[in-house]
Image (tube, rainbow, N blue to C red):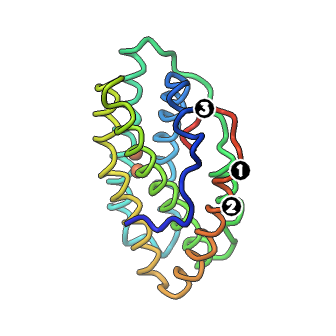
Amino acid sequence: MLLFREKVPPDWLPKVLANLPAVLVDHAHLERKAATSALNLEKYRDLFGRVEELNAIAIEELQHFQLVLDLLKRRGIPFGQPYPSPWIAGLMRTVRNGQRTQVIDHLICCSLIEGRSCEKFQFLAAALKTSDPELAEFYAGLVESEGNHYATYLLMARSIEPEETEKRLDFYLDLDRNLIQQPNPLPMLH
Ligand SMILES: [Fe+2]
Ligand SMILES: [Fe+2]
């Protein structure tokens, strides 16, 4: 179950639907970054015991990346430049230094990114059902996986320090609520 405190703004879906080629390129980069995030989490001592789980997530994200690249190729859309997401940057900017604090914050940020992807992929799957069934099916096929990543990262944080995780989750859910309302004119998933 997703814990978000604010709905995706109503202008997000029309903006994305009107710019699908650019959104697919952004999506490719999002999956690439998801794979590297899973690998980056392996640097924390508290996650040494979870390294194989994190590898499995990284492999899954790399497969998603390849699926988006295949889709781009089929549609004649060239792979292109990544654009930074103000929402992701806003979350990551507040990750604290220090061994415990950093791993908890980093896991919560990764969890929320996965959770918002899961939510937005559901909206895309529903919205594209008649206009672009192939893409609708593609997005529907990713929902479960991103939802699992959301839950896995949150559970990893809770298993390290439950109280600190709840405290920081509260902070990050408020931050997400503020950041998601900031307008982003670029056609991006986040
Ligand atoms: Fe993914
Ligand atoms: Fe994911």
Quadrant of the snapshot with the C terminus: top right
Q: Position of residue 84 (x, y in %)?
A: 67, 40
Question: Relative to 84, is 87 above or below?
Answer: below
Task: Estimate the spatial distance between the alpha carbons at disc 3 and disc 1, rounded to whole Å.
Answer: 14 Å
The location of residue 68, given as percent across then percent down, is 40, 30
Q: Check disc 1 and give the amino acid type.
A: Gln
Residue at the spot x=41%, y=25% of the render?
69
Question: Which three-letter amino acid code belongs to the residue tagged 2?
Answer: Asn
Q: Which mark is residue 100?
A: none
Q: Which residue is mark 2?
A: 178
Q: Is residue 44 left or right of residue 97?
A: left
Is 111 or 46 nearer to us in this picture? 111
Q: Residue at point 51% right, 16% down?
A: 78
Where is mark 3, residue-wise? 187
Q: Earlier in the sequence, mark 3 or mark 2?
A: 2
Residue 154 vs 6, above or below: the answer is below
Q: Secondary structure at mark 3?
A: loop
- Residue at the outermost bottom position: 163
Q: Position of residue 93 (x, y in %)?
A: 71, 60
Q: Nearer the viewer, residue 140 or 57?
A: 140
The residue at which mark 1 appears reads as 182
